[in-house]
């Protein structure tokens, strides 16, 4: 009997889920969100409204209810093979140009980083200041390396 009295109250509590979310900002200004209290040292808690709990998933449709994907309509434009090959060739050419340009930018970024690594300013007695000064140059190198890797991956998928 007591359970029946408490049931509506428990369901109302379960209907509103609330999580403690913390917003953390590191020294370089990057934001990170966490719900783990042990990782949230120095972070500020966010005041979020309660969110209704997730409704139960709908039952999977029966195999008779599943329809095959719709075919393209008869008037849907089709591209002939030579035109598609021409487009693929143009795409390959553009990607290769981008790759060459990115390689030049990477070489310049590495050169700039090497120049900055060779410089030691008098105001940088603390090595952390050197690392802080070099960080943007290292990020630039990493960005160009990532772009090159992505372009090479894209080129490898072309027919």
Image (tube, rainbow, N blue to C red):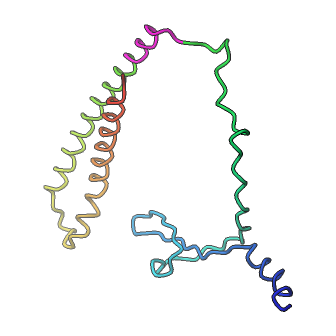
Q: In the rendering, at what x and y percent does residue 99 appear?
A: 30, 31
Q: Quadrant of residue 150?
A: top left
Q: Does 1 sit above or below residue 63?
A: below
Q: Does 121 sit above or below residue 92?
A: below
Q: In the rendering, at what x and y percent does residue 88 appear?
A: 40, 18
Residue located 18% across and 63% down the image: 121
Is 83 a magenta residue? yes
* Region of the chain picked out in magenta, as a range: 79-89
Residue located 31% across and 52% down the image: 139
Q: Is 101 on the left-hand or right-hand side of 7? A: left
Q: Nearer the viewer, residue 24 or 72?
A: 72
Image quarter hosting the C terminus: top left
**Magenta residues: mostly which secondary structure?**
helix
Q: Is 142 on the left-hand or right-hand side of 55? A: left
Q: Nearer the viewer, residue 146 or 56?
A: 56
Q: In the rendering, at what x and y percent does residue 71 appear?
A: 64, 22
Q: Does 38 sit above or below residue 83?
A: below
Residue located 65% across and 31% down the image: 68
Q: Residue furthest left?
A: 118
Q: Nearer the viewer, residue 32 or 60?
A: 60
Is 15 a magenta residue? no
């Amino acid at each position: 009997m007591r359970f029946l009295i408490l049931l509506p109250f428990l369901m109302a509590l379960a209907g509103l889920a609330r999580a403690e979310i913390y917003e953390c900002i590191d020294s370089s200004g990057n934001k990170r969100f966490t719900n783990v209290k042990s990782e949230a040292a120095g972070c500020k808690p966010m005041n979020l409204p309660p969110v209704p709990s997730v409704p139960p998933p709908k039952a999977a449709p029966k195999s008779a209810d599943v329809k095959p994907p719709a075919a393209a309509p008869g008037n849907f434009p089709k591209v002939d093979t030579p035109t598609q090959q021409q487009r693929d060739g143009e795409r390959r050419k553009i990607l290769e140009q981008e790759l060459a340009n990115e390689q030049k930018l990477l070489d310049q970024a590495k050169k700039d980083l090497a120049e900055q690594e060779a410089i030691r300013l008098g105001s940088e007695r603390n090595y952390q200041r050197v690392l802080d000064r070099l960080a943007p140059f290292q990020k630039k190198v990493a960005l160009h390396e990532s772009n090159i890797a992505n372009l090479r991956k894209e080129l490898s998928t072309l027919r």
